[in-house]
Amino acid sequence: PLTLISSSARRLDRRLTDLTDSDRKLLASIRKEVWDADHLVRDLVDLARSESGSLKLKLSSVKAIEIISDLSAELEPLDWGDRVQTPSSEDLSMVETVMIAVNPARLRQCIINVLENASKYSPDDAPIELSIASDECNIYFDVKDYGCGISQEDQHTIFKPFQRGKSDLADVPGSGIGLALVHQIVRLMNGSIFILSSGESGTIMRFEFPVE
């Protein structure tokens, strides 16, 4: 049903040439709500499978920088995608030969989820920074926002299912599923995700994976 609603809204937008601006905004809102609902259902299914142990991921050896390059194309159509500042060419050159064993599509899904979360809890005109670095043992993907930070109390529960921070803004949409699913998927790829720092100037969320 969600696919039918979404495709119908797209067809209406293309075929009806005399729509007012408000009508087009309504169709765009319908597509966005369908997209959100579809991803919520998928996340719920994945979370249930991960908790039951039935979610299996096929890992492959890839260059870490390929995750970033492929991610850029996926960010482009998103409403908040232009706020994301990706690593510079110089930063990428520092990890050009680093290999990691992950499921590339799932890792991009996880990074986008955290980036989207950062977009919700920071000013609309504030950038969201995605950086990459490595040492002898690990590769690090950091997501930095310029929001109001996460309280110490909320940091203990933020990766648990259906747990939204007590300080969450009432008008910020969310289900409490996204970060819990990210945590589970990252764990299945032998990685970890944690809050590197958080305060009044913003939050840095870190992904960590062993290098090959």
Image: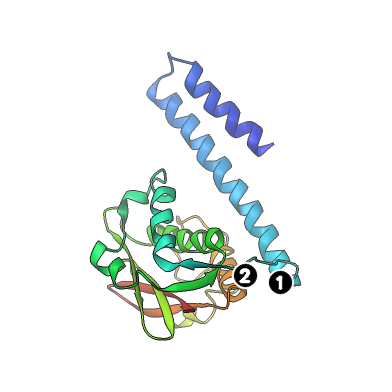
Q: Residue at x 59, y 66 (%)?
A: 181
Counting residues from the start of the chain, the first of labels 2 and 1 encountered is 1
Which quadrant of the rendered structure holds the N terminus?
Answer: top right
Question: Is 206 above or below relative to 7?
Answer: below
- Seen from the viewer's position, the closer of residues 87 and 64 is 64
Structural crowding at the residue carrying mark 2, measured as other residues with C-alpha within 10 Å and reported as few (<14), some (14–19) or many (≥20): some
- Seen from the viewer's position, the closer of residues 96 and 26 is 96
User: Any mark on residue 165, and which?
Assistant: none
Q: In this view, does 121 lie to the left or right of 154?
A: left
Q: In this view, does 175 lie to the left or right of 155?
A: right
Residue type, numbered disc 1: Glu
Q: Name the residue under label 1.
A: 51
Most distant residue in the left direction: 90
Most distant residue in the front direction: 97
Circles 2 and 1: CB distance less than 8 Å?
yes
Q: Position of residue 207 (x, y in %)?
A: 45, 74
Q: Where is residue 157 in the image (x, y as percent from the top left)?
A: 54, 78
Q: Mark 2 points at which residue?
A: 161
